[in-house]
Structures are given as structure tokens and as C-alpha cells.
Image (cartoon, rainbow, N blue to C red):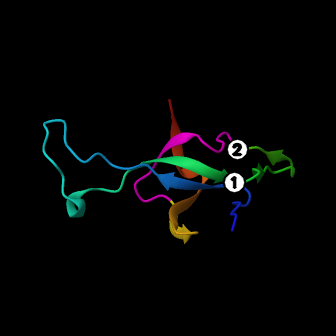
Amino acid sequence: MTFRPLHDRVAVRRLEAEEKTKGGIIIPDNAKEKPQEGEIVAAGSGARDETGRLVPLAVKQGDKVLFGKWSGTEVKIDGQELLIMKETDIMGVIG
């Protein structure tokens, strides 16, 4: 099954969190916070402005992004855990 978000929504796969701190301490799975970085796996066509014109998204598939801690809705599609969020929930593109 393929998935294409509608309008100004994107599908994001979280990037794996670090296993160790900078000091070398290994963090157990139950103490880890969910990462706030991810990669866009699918993006909608864009939102409409007040005049009805289509405004394309500033992000595209493959971009690595930073998003808010509580952003998005978690879904499972084809066994893959993804976040579906609006483009406005994305704080910026990394690198």
C-alpha cells in the first residue's frame, strides 16, 4: 500500500535516538525520550491560501527535519511507524 498525505500534511519517520550520553553512559530503552528528528517519507501537494491558490510545501521527501515533542499523530502503515503532521509542526530542515 502506498500512502500520500493530503494538503499540507507530511508523513515522517523518526530517526533513531542516541544509545549513549556524551559521557559514555548507556541509556536504557525505557528511559529514552522519543527523538524529535525525522525524515520525510511522503508529502502532500500543499495548502490553499485565501484566494484559493495552491501554496506548495517548503519541505520534500527525503528532507531531515526537526519537529516539536508532541507533534503529529502516530500511525502504523505497512509495519512502519510514522508520524502524520502538518507542515507548520515542523521547526526546520536539518543540514
- Amino acid bearing label 1: Asp
Secondary structure of the residue carrying numbered label 1: loop
Q: Nearer the viewer, residue 68 or 95?
A: 95
Q: For mark 1, what is the residue?
A: 8
The crowding category of the residue bearing disc 1, from other C-alpha atoms within 10 Å (few below 14, some 14 to 19, many at least 20), is: some
Q: Is residue 15 left or right of residue 31?
A: right
Q: Nearer the viewer, residue 91 or 39?
A: 39
Q: Main secondary structure of the magenta part?
A: loop
* Dots 2, 1 in contact, CB < 8 A: yes
Residue 6, image x and y in percent? 73, 61
Residue 83, image x and y in percent? 52, 60
Q: Name which quarter of the figure residue 59 lies in.
A: top right
Quadrant containing the N terminus is: bottom right
Mark 2 / mark 1, whichever is N-terminal: 1
Secondary structure of the residue carrying numbered label 2: loop
At a point 55% along the width and 54% down the height, the residue shown is 12
Q: Is residue 10 left or right of residue 45?
A: left
Q: Between marks 2 and 1, how big is the CA–CA gap?
A: 7 Å
Q: Is 68 a magenta residue?
A: yes
Q: Is residue 76 left or right of residue 56?
A: left
Q: For mark 2, what is the residue?
A: 57
Q: Is residue 57 above or below residue 27?
A: above
Residue 74, image x and y in percent? 49, 67
* Residue interval drawn in magenta: 57-71
At a point 83% along the width and 48% down the height, the residue shown is 54
Q: Is 65 a magenta residue?
A: yes
Residue 24, image x and y in percent? 14, 39
Q: Residue furthest top?
A: 95
Q: Is residue 61 above or below residue 71?
A: above
At a point 67% along the width and 39% down the height, the residue shown is 58
- Amino acid bearing label 2: Leu
